[in-house]
Amino acid sequence: MSYIPHTDVERQQMLAAIGVTTVEDLFEAVPSAHRFPALDMPAAMSEMDILAEMLALSEANDHAQDFAIFRGAGAYHHFIPAAINHLLLRGEFLTAYTPYQPEVSQGTLQATFEYQSMMCALTGMDACNASHYDGGTSLAEAVTVALEATRHKRTKILLSHGIHPHYRDVVRTYHQGRDLDVTGDEGAASLADLEAMIDDNTAMVALGYPNFFGQIEAFSKLAATAHEKGALVTVVANPTALGLLKPPGAMGADMVVGEAQPLGVPLGFGGPYVGFFGVKMDYVRRIAGRIVGETVDKNGKRAYVMTLRPREQDIRREKATSNICTNQGLMALAATIYLCLMGKNGMRKVAELCYHKAHYAADMIDLLEGYEVLDLEKPFFHEFVVKCPTSVAALNKHLIERGIVGGYDLGQDYPHLQDHMLVCVTEMNRKEEIDALVQAMGEVNAL
């Protein structure tokens, strides 16, 4: 009660106003045997002791600052400028929720508009919505758009095995119960194999750029074939890589989706994250989420409004394309601030650092006895696959003892890649850390 500034007199006045005498009178509806049970509560603590206790509990968790991290697989350890967190903590942003008359919140709408504009520039798309829960959700929503665009006359969805396995699981979960043939990701089908699977029943083809294994694959030919057959092309993109690579929209993508966590959002034990969703103008009215546009008010001043699609599209079940009714606004704001701080040159610099550091690491690991970096001659971004001389679990146990978080065990999701590790290198990994990783991996053969 020490934080509730009511005096005893004021409490008595409030009780009298509602016709009772004591606080206990408020609980008469609760059976007496259960009304005020004895609680085995610890003794009260001072603020100083509570702080020490909470700090000790927090230190029980390992966090990114404790280790050299070489694991990505969808959650990436990037540098986050200090300004992002300070701006997110502003009350206007931290507690904001888009009201039912959104034009009242011009600041919130402007932040959303800036986010959408920058994501469009990054992906090469005509429009981008106000964000989804995560990358997997974005891909699942792309399937919905493709089905709507083909008037539900097509039932085949092709997913590349080079898309994050969790994203593919989300697609199947989202659309379970529908008469859909979600296929293409069995085994290790190449983009050429995937292209050969496109037929007149295909609603959408989806692929990674770079793919889950870090490989950069040109998909213009596949996109042309898909469009000839009347299918849409969705690209699951790494936004950091887009600071260096050609935007998917310039290569024939109809939709570009993915996880924006690399853009200023911390690892956070797996969330909250934020899915981005870019689309060509032809399909913009079929997407889930909100779109903000810029206009002028009656006085000629700049103003921001909901545009292109009615809010009722989400409210009315019979007209809705999705069950999405909110968005990851705060995380999208983090991405917005990150993109503003980095700018075009900064984004390219981060991507270049990731690219070159990953190639240095791959070259060094490939020299180790018993190890092989797969497809080293092919272009890749900041992740690559390593064939290991022992199980990945055993190798990672050895690495963690040396303060290193090793790569992702691909055998969990790809049976043909047992004892293969997906290694990730970002701008956060110093040369000394990479050299320590290589040395520790080399020690495994001597165990």
Image (cartoon, rainbow, N blue to C red):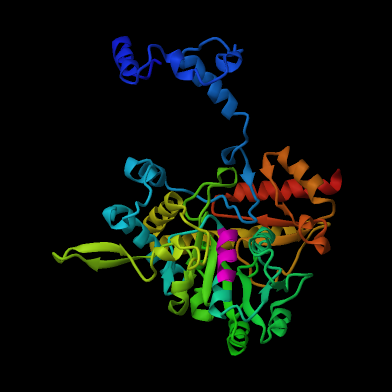
- Image-based side of 238 in relation to 411, left or right: left
> In the rendered image, which quarter is residue 134 located in?
bottom right
Where is the C terminus found, in terms of image quarters?
Answer: top right
Residue furthest to the bottom in view is: 228
Residue for point 48% across, 72% down: 286
At a point 56% along the width and 65% down the height, the residue shown is 141
> Magenta includes 252?
no
Count all numbered tags in the image, as a single digit: 0
Side (left or right) of 351 relative to 393 = left
Q: Nearer the viewer, residue 98 or 29?
A: 29
Vertical arrangement, residue 104 with respect to residue 116, above or below: above
Q: What residue sits 58% from the left and 41% below the top?
A: 64
| Residue 137 sits inside the magenta stretch | yes
Percent across and percent down for residue 355 are: 57, 63
Q: Give the quarter of the figure containing the N terminus.
A: top left
Q: Which residues are magenta?
A: 135-144
Q: Residue at x 44, y 60 (%)?
A: 315
Q: Is residue 217 visible?
A: no
